[in-house]
Image: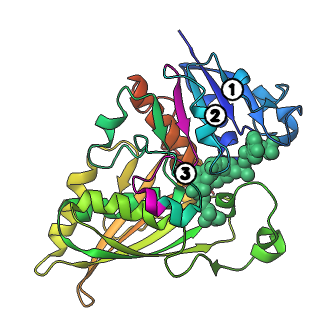
Amino acid sequence: MALRAAVAGASGYAGGEVLRLLLGHPQVEIGALTGGSNAGRRLGELQPHLLPLADRLLEPTSVEVLSGHDVVFLALPHGQSAAVAEQLGDEVLVVDCGADFRLEDAAAWERFYGSAHAGTWPYGLPELPGARDALKGTKRIAVPGCYPTAVSLALFPAYAAGIVEPEAVVVAASGTSGAGKAAKPHLLGSEVMGSMSPYGVGGVHRHTPEIVQNLSAAAGEPVTVSFTPTLAPMPRGILATCSAKARPGTTAEQVRAAYERALEAEPFVHLLPEGQWPATAAVYGSNCALLQVALDEAAGRVVAISAIDNLAKGTAGGAVQSMNIALGLPEELGLSTIGVAP
Ligand SMILES: NC(=O)C1=CN([C@@H]2O[C@H](COP(=O)(O)OP(=O)(O)OC[C@H]3O[C@@H](n4cnc5c(N)ncnc54)[C@H](OP(=O)(O)O)[C@@H]3O)[C@@H](O)[C@H]2O)C=CC1
Ligand SMILES: CC(=O)N[C@@H](CCC(=O)OP(=O)(O)O)C(=O)O
């Protein structure tokens, strides 16, 4: 029997990508689609690539509209999920693409998001140690941020293996869809085209505590992270360049072995052959994260690089993968490791 899934925020980038994946999911039937300012419009006007849903109308985002489904995906701005989720009842699986339930540390939430902490839900990055067990059977999933997905996948094998010191430096480039669909002056084509620029510099980006949370859990001790995001002139993709000081005596063979061990059974995280480096173009539209790692012996640092599609593995793909686990479905159902190129 098909599961009925509703998507709140269906007019946005994350909601649109959830719908693109659900249209290819053999066990899911698409129910209500809701929006904010676009409620009342045809989806085809806003998401013309989702042709099978073109004539569906966006309804207002209300508990009445979202009730009566097996799964509800929330792809709403930060801070809006809790009020909806708490009225949906405990029987429905709620998958929140927003940040509201990702952080365990309420003080960190308040510092970075400036509002009261709503709580913590099982975290939808199945590859992290222990994450699958927490997701099985859950009725609530907090989908990670796109940068935390890329960075945590790149560095958790090193921390889990104990081969690096508890400090990491990350510089990551994101495509512009990471910022959402609502028009923003710094994202106008003329500002972004042909240029890369940093933002959120100096430990102030709200994904910093999420990355710290994930790496500290993998390491079993507090990890500090210097995280610098940059904006790249591409619609999708994240390339995260991450490094951490190697523990004394760590060899290149040990580094490689730690990553092979951590990732060998993962369907969606692929360690490339030695000498081949990840590129965002290779994961466009796919749920795959591509990884490579090297030991910089002169600098004494492990350097790990990951590439993901921020809207796929970084949001909607991670959401569907986690949904599959929560519902006891095969984890790979409806998801692909095949990209679009060139
Ligand atoms: N873009 C990305 O790479 C990632 C995004 N996310 C998360 O997904 C969520 C959505 O982001 P994204 O899709 O990028 O953003 P968009 O701006 O593209 O979409 C936002 C969506 O929320 C709806 N919305 C806005 N305000 C309201 C409101 N007051 N009531 C009801 N609906 C409202 C919009 O509807 P309308 O257009 O009709 O007003 C739209 O459907 C965010 O929490 C974001 O953090 C998570 C990981 C990565
Ligand atoms: C390019 C860009 O602006 N990216 C977004 C991150 C998007 C994302 O994953 O974030 P949330 O789900 O936490 O909003 C940013 O830096 O705010």
- What secondary structure is found at the residue carrying circle 2? helix
The foreground one among 229 and 260 is 229
Q: Position of residue 228 (x, y in %)?
A: 51, 76
Query: Which quadrant is home to the C terminus?
Result: bottom right
- What secondary structure is found at the residue carrying circle 1? helix
Majority secondary structure of magenta residues: loop
Please give the name of the residue rendered at 80% of the width and 31% of the height, measured from the top-left corner. 60
Q: Which range of residues does the magenta coloring cover?
A: 91-108
Crowd rating for badge 3 (residues with CA inside 10 Å; few <14, some 14–19, many 20+): many
Q: Position of residue 250 (x, y in %)?
A: 14, 76
Q: Is mark 3 within 8 Å of ligand 2?
A: yes
The colour mode here is rainbow
Q: Which residue matches tag 1? A: 63
Name the amino acid, label 3: Ala
Q: Which residue matches tag 3? A: 99
Looking at the image, residue 149 sits to the left or right of residue 42; the answer is left
- Foreground mark, 2 or 3, reads 2
Looking at the image, residue 50 sits to the left or right of residue 326; the answer is right
Q: Position of residue 41 (x, y in %)?
A: 89, 34
Q: Which residue matches tag 2? A: 84
Query: How far separated are the C-alphas under marks 3 and 1?
Result: 20 Å
Badge 2 vs badge 1, beta-carbon distance below 8 Å: yes
Looking at the image, is mark 2 or mark 3 earlier in the sequence?
Answer: 2
